[in-house]
Structure formats: structure tokens, C-alpha cells
Amino acid sequence: MESKGLLKNEELYRYVLETSVYPREPQHLTDLRNVTANHPRAAMATSPDAGQLIAMLLQLVNAKKTIEVGVFTGYSLLLTALSIPEDGKVTAIDVNRETYEIGLPIIRRAGVEHKIDFIESEALPILDKLLKDYGNEGSFDFAFVDADKVNYWNYHERLLKLLKVGGIIVYDNTLWGGTVAMPEDSAPEAMKMGRQLTIDLNKLLAADSRVQISHASLGDGITICRRLY
């Protein structure tokens, strides 16, 4: 497996995976990762090293009620469902049910489908509906966002209202293949729009006094935000 992120030395990245990640990866996650590897957009999947940290964060905050914006084949969704209690719930939102169904047989074999409420939709209308429904504001423990970059800040504003104080949001792809540190004319053309959106998001998150943040160079970059008030 080639590194998605900033460990450009493939031998070093493989060392991390083979020493610390793969031996601890539940078999169902391994199965889903292998199935996803055959998809033409396999690079969209959550990297297993980032997934390992996300699973730890879920358990550190005793997450029970969570949101996922952007599902793809379901690697991060499955690790969330495996990490939360038997009566926990993941509200999973994606515009494409077809890719979710690639991983669904493995999710079923893992015995966690009952924890997942999959909604095929754009995310903003669903987040707005959750905010309008009684009892949701300030009730979620955790959120993971790996979706359209243009709306990350819109998601952030809504998710902060939905999260408990002390709850965590994790944003994926916040280093955008390392292009955030490149001059614009050096970035690949296909990545330029996402590069600028990611730079703008990172500045906004860094200046947001409502959250404590950690910008980690795992996978394609993840930013962990803990709601302070």
C-alpha cells in the first residue's frame, strides 16, 4: 500500500502499517479495506493509520451517538460502529448509496448494521433537520467529515451545535496531498481548487476559539477539533 500522506518514504510508512496498524486492525476492517482497494477511487478511503487514531478517539470520549458526513465504501463507518457500544448509533450521510453497498455485506457480517442509520442525501439539509428536531442539539459525541471540501466550514458550524461540549469532530484531507504548503503554480491542476479550499478551512479552524485543535499528518492530514463551549 502506498502512502496517501506525508511519509513519502514508502518503507517507513509500510513499517508503521505492518508494525502498529495491521496487527491491531479487526478482520472485518481488513476485509473492507481489501475490497475497497479494487475500486477505481480507492484513494478516497480513510487510511488505516488515521482510522486507528479515530477508533481511539471514539473510545476516549466514550462515543455513543455519532455523525459521519461522507461514507464511500464504509471503512471509517465500520470502525466507528465497531468502536461504539451495542446501543450506539451512527448517522451516516452520503449522496451515493452505491459505494456504501460495496462495504455493506462486510458491515453485516461484522454484526453492526443495526448501529447505522444511512441516509442517501446531501449533508446540509440533513444536518439542518437534525438541528430542528428536538433533543439533537448538543447531544452528539463525535463527528467524522470526509466529503465535499467546499462545504467543510458549513458542516463545521452545524456540527458544533450538534456536538456536546467536549465532543470531537475529525476532518479528513486537511493537508490535501501536501499541496497546502506548495506555491499555487506548483500544485497539480486537478488539486488547485481543493488546495485553496483546504488552506482557507485550516486558517478558519486555527482561528476558531470554540475548539481545541490538533492537525495530524496521518493519511492525507486529519484535523481533530474538540468543542470547548
Image (spheres, rainbow, N blue to C red):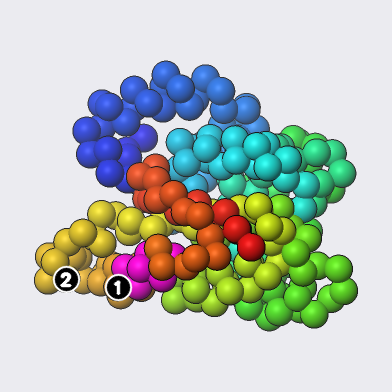
Query: Quick one: quadrant of the N terminus?
Result: top left
Q: Can you identify the residue that label 1 sits on? A: 196
| Residue 171 sits above or below residue 27 on the image | below
Q: What residue lies at 60% left-to-right and 40% top-to-bottom?
A: 57
> What secondary structure is marked by label 1?
helix
Q: Which residues are magenta?
A: 199-205
Q: What residue sits right under mark 2 in the picture?
A: 184
Can residue 146 be seen?
yes
Query: Residue 186 occupies which quadrant of the picture?
Result: bottom left
Vertical arrangement, residue 53 with respect to residue 19, above or below: below
Q: Residue at x 65, y 32 (%)?
A: 28
Residue 59 lies, in percent from the top left, at: 67, 37
Measured Cα–Cα span from mark 1 to mark 2:
8 Å
**Residue 204 belongs to magenta span:** yes
Q: Is residue 81 visible?
A: no
- Quadrant in the picture for residue 140: bottom right
Describe residue 115's horizontal placement relative to residue 225 as left or right.
right
Which quadrant would the C terminus be assigned to in this image?
bottom right
Q: Main secondary structure of the magenta part?
A: helix
Q: Position of residue 54 (x, y in %)?
A: 56, 42
For marks 1 and 2, the one nearer the N-term is 2
- Please tell me which residue lies in front, 213 or 47: 213
- The quarter of the displayed image where residue 118 is located: bottom right
- Tag count: 2
Q: Are marks 1 and 2 in contact (CB under 8 Å)?
A: yes
Secondary structure beneath disc 2? helix
Per the rendering, the mark at residue 67 is: none
Binning the other alpha carbons within 10 Å of mark 2 as few (below 14), some (14 to 19) or many (20 upward) gives some
- Reply above or below: 8 against 43: above
| Residue situated in front as seen by the camera: 146 or 1 | 146
- Graded by Cα atoms within 10 Å as few (under 14), some (14 to 19) or many (20 or more), the crowding at tag 1 reads some
